[in-house]
């Protein structure tokens, strides 16, 4: 079982010039079972992205342990796929070459990878776009390519850093459905970082609200909206009374934190 | 065919000029119409307004070409093919007149006599005041003053019409009469006059070393040319006229005796050396003034009146004889004209340093002719052609002899009977020295190719070495910090400042130039590759890490392509800088290349050749840039869209 365990995780950034320390994360503790989808919310500067970068292996925690499927996380690896806000696509490659990038790096030939690439392009709704240069795609389509590029590698855990932040409202809703669909279809463990409370509620089976200074998990929710979203339309869910009360609760929670940061203005 | 074109370049130019003028007018017409059609819905400042407009491009190009034709006297030659020849005859007349006009206030403000009197009187007064008394005995002092007074008297006698020499008067009258005859002759009818046979056989204007044919080819020219001979006679007579009256003769003789006596110092004075020098200088100064006026070239002012009027009459007649030629000269011969060259019959001013477009093409085709034997190419090298290149030479260039030396074993020795059997090492050495026949391959050759070759080889090495280093410098602290100081120390030095050093060390042939250009290209490539590499977005690097790529794979598949736009921009800049440096380096030293041609052309003031090289360099630079633009569009279509 490739569960994610996170124990006593601390991250302190030291400014090399002044020597001053910033506690980005302190005593983070949680575990994520395989197939769970987690969303992380919080005001800016609460360490969401730092947490994600540590899970991805881009930065090493000051103290504490992180493990996936019983293996300590030391460095970035293909078993933890990542989707960035701007797609981070390789604009000099076509859609298909972007998607099979991970496979080719493993030594697979383009022809061998073809079937997989086509399957995932179909899955994310980009049939026939294989030979299109990525710079000709719209923002939403680029994000679909990024998803396919990540999924084709068959990772155990998918990390998404504000994946839909740069999209317009309509595209965003479609993409949210797509993420839920992919979650159901693949049964992958997914962590989504977002700024949008609605998105966090819609996508998260579990939801962490993080608080800043030091970065910590302030509150945890277990929600059923993601499960609902697999069957019903997301707009319907947004009309639910429970959805709205939870949203207001979280919003005021974050609002209070923000006010605290700004000095209670 | 080629000769025919060369001989008829004036007529060809006329056709081109008419076409250009038509294009110019036509494009303005189209442009005005287009402007009227579109003006309403376009907003000022909208970049869309700059789109299109081929007609204005046509207008600008044809205007430029017309200006070129005009200032190079191309229009003059095409429309008035004989004007320059006639002007040349005018120049002959004016040149023949010049000994006479020099004595008159024609090109100057004063009569020559007036100027002489004024200047010499002033100098005499100065000398009289500044006499160094201590080096002369009292007697000598008296004599010196007397000499000065007598010279002044001489000036008076020469200036006074009362004492004027009878012979001189009649001679001047004869000159005046002759000039009036000349003036009359200039008004003669020239329509019946025929040019000489050899005049018609002269090469046409601009087709040979002689720019403008000298012998008259038109009736007008024949008339002017024949008048020139008469004028020369008159001028000769005029120069012989001397104004020495008996009074003047007496004064001259007396002064001569006094001055001669003063030349040797009185032995009683016992002068030391500097004093003797002072004395000598003073006497010499007086003597010099005396010699200037004792030849009788000073005339009373009004004695010149008759000649002066006659000269003016000649000029008036000359103007009549020129007729429409004066208009042509002032309108179509911008610059200094032909007359300024006196009897040289050459183009002066812009016509001189700006060759006619058709002549430039002619010079270019001579250069481009690959047949060296028939006068093509330049200094024994074609402009751009091909030759057979022995493969052995290339191999010898690539394998240094030292490499063979390092192989195990030793070279062969001669045997008992004095025979020599080469062993494997000897055979390899022969290959390394290019002594083996490996066949030949066709290879480009010529001045242009030599220049191109230097740039391309240097660019090749610059890219091969510079790009990998730059990429590593963009991703590694060691590489960046270790190499940065070295590159930054040599890079800011202007490449040409390195040239004397590099050319001395590596030689003035290809090696030195290629190394110099390599230095230029290398620095630019390193910096651009480094900028491109260090500009890779962190998210792309992270994404590729998460996709399981190794460091070297990221370098090859992410950082290199990401740096590609910067690298290609670097190549584009480097080619431009290399090209500029190369031409300058070729001017410094060398025996082939475009810069070499221009340098030789400069030393012999061959303006056509200079312009041809300038145009070739401009065109090649343009081609470089176009190729790079195409390459950029082809290789990195994603540029600026990521």
Image (spheres, coloured by chain):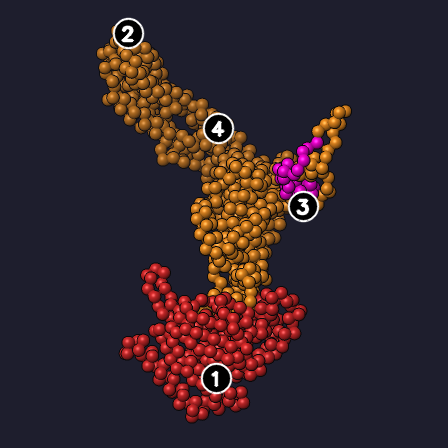
Chain colours: A red, B orange
Circle 2 Cα neighbour tier, 10 Å, few/some/many (<14 / 14–19 / ≥20):
few
Could you say where residue B467 lies in the image, as x and y percent from the top left? 53, 54
- In the depicted structure, whether residue B219 falls above or below residue B112: below
Q: Are marks 1 and 3 on the same chain?
A: no
| Of callouts 3 and 4, the N-terminal one | 4
Secondary structure beneath dot 1 equals loop
Could you say where residue B342 lies in the image, as x and y percent from the top left? 50, 35
Circle 3 Cα neighbour tier, 10 Å, few/some/many (<14 / 14–19 / ≥20):
few
Please tell me which residue is depicted at 24% across the width and 11% down the height of the picture: B137
Does the segment drawn in magenta span residue B365?
no
User: Are discs 1 and 4 less than 8 Å apart at CB?
Assistant: no
Q: Is residue B516 visible?
A: yes
- Using the numbered discs, state the Cα–Cα distance from disc 1 to disc 3 in whole angstroms: 72 Å
Judge by depth and name the residue closer to the eye, B225 or B510: B510
Residue indicated by mark 3: B443
Residue indicated by mark 1: A205
Side of B277 where B391 appears, left or right: right
| Of callouts 4 and 2, the N-terminal one | 4
Secondary structure beneath dot 4 equals helix
Could you say where residue A251 lies in the image, as x and y percent from the top left? 37, 84
- Using the numbered discs, state the Cα–Cα distance from disc 4 to disc 2 in whole angstroms: 52 Å
Residue indicated by mark 4: B234
Q: Are marks 1 and 4 on the same chain?
A: no
The subunit carrying tag 4 is: B
Q: Determine the residue located farthest toward the front in the rendered image.
A: A70
Q: Is residue B435 visible?
A: no
Q: Are marks 3 and 4 on the same chain?
A: yes
Image: magenta residue range: B388-412
Residue indicated by mark 2: B267
The subunit carrying tag 2 is: B
């Amino acid at each position: 079982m490739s569960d994610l365990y996170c124990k006593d995780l601390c991250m302190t950034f030291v400014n090399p010039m002044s020597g001053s320390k910033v506690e980005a994360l302190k005593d983070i503790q949680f575990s994520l079972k395989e197939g769970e989808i987690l969303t992380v919310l919080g005001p800016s500067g609460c360490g969401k992205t730092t947490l994600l970068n540590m899970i991805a292996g881009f930065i090493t925690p000051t103290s504490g342990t992180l493990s996936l499927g019983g293996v300590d996380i030391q460095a970035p690896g293909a078993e933890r796929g990542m989707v960035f806000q701007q797609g981070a696509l390789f604009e000099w490659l076509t859609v298909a070459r972007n998607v099979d990038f991970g496979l080719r790096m493993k030594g697979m030939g383009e022809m061998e990878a073809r079937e997989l690439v086509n399957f995932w392009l179909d899955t994310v709704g980009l049939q026939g776009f294989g030979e299109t240069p990525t710079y000709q795609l719209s923002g939403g389509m680029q994000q679909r390519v990024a998803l396919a590029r990540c999924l084709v590698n068959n990772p155990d855990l998918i990390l998404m850093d504000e994946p839909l932040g740069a999209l317009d409202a309509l595209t965003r809703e479609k993409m949210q459905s797509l993420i839920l669909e992919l979650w159901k279809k693949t049964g992958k463990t997914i962590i989504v970082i977002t700024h949008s409370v609605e998105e966090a509620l819609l996508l998260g089976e579990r939801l962490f609200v993080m608080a800043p200074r030091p970065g910590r998990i302030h509150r945890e929710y277990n929600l059923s909206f993601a499960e609902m979203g697999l069957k019903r339309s997301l707009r319907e869910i947004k009309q639910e009374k429970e959805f709205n009360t939870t949203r207001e609760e979280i919003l005021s929670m974050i609002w209070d934190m923000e006010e605290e940061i700004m000095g209670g203005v | 065919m080629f000769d025919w074109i060369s001989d008829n370049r004036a007529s060809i130019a006329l056709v081109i000029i008419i076409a250009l003028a038509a294009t110019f007018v036509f494009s303005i017409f189209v442009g005005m119409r287009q402007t009227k059609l579109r003006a309403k819905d376009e907003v000022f400042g909208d970049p869309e307004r700059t789109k299109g407009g081929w007609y204005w491009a046509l207008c600008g190009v044809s205007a430029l070409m017309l200006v070129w034709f005009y200032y190079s006297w191309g229009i003059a030659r095409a429309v008035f093919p004989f004007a320059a020849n006639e002007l040349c005859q005018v120049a002959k007349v004016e040149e023949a007149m010049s000994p006479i006009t020099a004595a008159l206030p024609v090109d100057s403000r004063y009569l020559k006599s007036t100027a002489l009197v004024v200047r010499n009187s002033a100098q005499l007064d100065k000398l009289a005041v500044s006499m160094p008394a201590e080096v002369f005995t009292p007697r000598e002092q008296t004599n010196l003053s007397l000499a000065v007074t007598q010279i002044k008297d001489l000036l008076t006698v020469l200036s006074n019409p009362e004492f004027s020499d009878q012979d001189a008067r009649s001679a001047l009258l004869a000159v005046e009469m002759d000039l009036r005859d000349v003036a009359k002759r200039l008004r003669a009818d020239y329509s019946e006059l025929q040019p000489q046979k050899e005049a018609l056989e002269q090469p046409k204007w601009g087709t040979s070393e002689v720019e403008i044919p000298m012998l008259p080819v038109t009736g007008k020219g024949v008339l002017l040319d024949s008048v020139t001979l008469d004028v020369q006679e008159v001028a000769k007579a005029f120069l012989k006229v001397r104004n020495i009256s008996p009074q003047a003769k007496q004064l001259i003789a007396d002064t001569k005796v006094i001055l001669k006596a003063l030349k040797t110092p009185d032995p009683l004075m016992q002068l030391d050396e500097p004093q003797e020098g002072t004395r000598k200088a003073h006497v010499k100064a007086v003597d010099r003034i005396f010699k200037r006026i004792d030849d009788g070239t000073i005339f009373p002012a009004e004695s010149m009146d008759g000649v002066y009027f006659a000269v003016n009459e000649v000029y008036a007649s000359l103007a009549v004889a020129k007729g429409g030629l004066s208009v042509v000269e002032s309108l179509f011969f911008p610059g200094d004209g032909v007359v300024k060259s006196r009897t040289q019959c050459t183009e002066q001013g812009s016509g001189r340093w700006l060759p006619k477009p058709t002549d430039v093409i002619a010079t270019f085709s001579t250069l481009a002719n690959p047949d060296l034997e028939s006068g093509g190419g330049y200094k024994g090298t074609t402009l751009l052609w091909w030759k057979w290149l022995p493969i052995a030479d290339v191999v010898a260039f690539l394998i240094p002899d030292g490499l063979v030396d390092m192989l195990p074993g030793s070279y062969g020795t001669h045997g008992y009977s004095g025979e020599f059997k080469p062993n494997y090492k000897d055979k390899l050495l022969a290959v390394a020295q290019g002594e083996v026949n490996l066949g030949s391959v066709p290879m480009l050759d010529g001045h242009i190719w030599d220049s191109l070759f230097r740039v391309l080889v240097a660019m090749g090495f610059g890219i091969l070495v510079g790009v990998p280093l730059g990429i590593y410098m963009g991703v590694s602290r060691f590489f960046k910090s270790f190499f940065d100081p070295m590159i930054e120390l040599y890079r800011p030095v202007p490449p040409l400042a390195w040239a004397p050093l590099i050319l001395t060390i590596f030689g003035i042939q290809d090696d030195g130039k290629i190394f110099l250009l390599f230095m230029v290209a290398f620095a630019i490539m390193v910096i651009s590759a480094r900028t491109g590499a260090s500009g890779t977005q962190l998210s792309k690097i992270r994404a590729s890490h998460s996709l399981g790529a190794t460091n070297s794979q990221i370098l090859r598949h992410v950082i290199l392509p990401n740096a590609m736009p910067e690298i290609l921009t670097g190549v584009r800049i480097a080619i431009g800088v290399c090209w500029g440096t190369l031409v300058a380096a070729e001017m410094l030293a060398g025996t082939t290349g475009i810069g070499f041609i221009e340098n030789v052309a400069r030393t012999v003031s061959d303006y056509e050749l200079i312009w041809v090289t300038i145009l070739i360099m401009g065109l090649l630079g343009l081609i470089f840039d176009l190729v790079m633009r195409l390459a950029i569009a082809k290789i990195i279509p994603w540029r600026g869209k990521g």
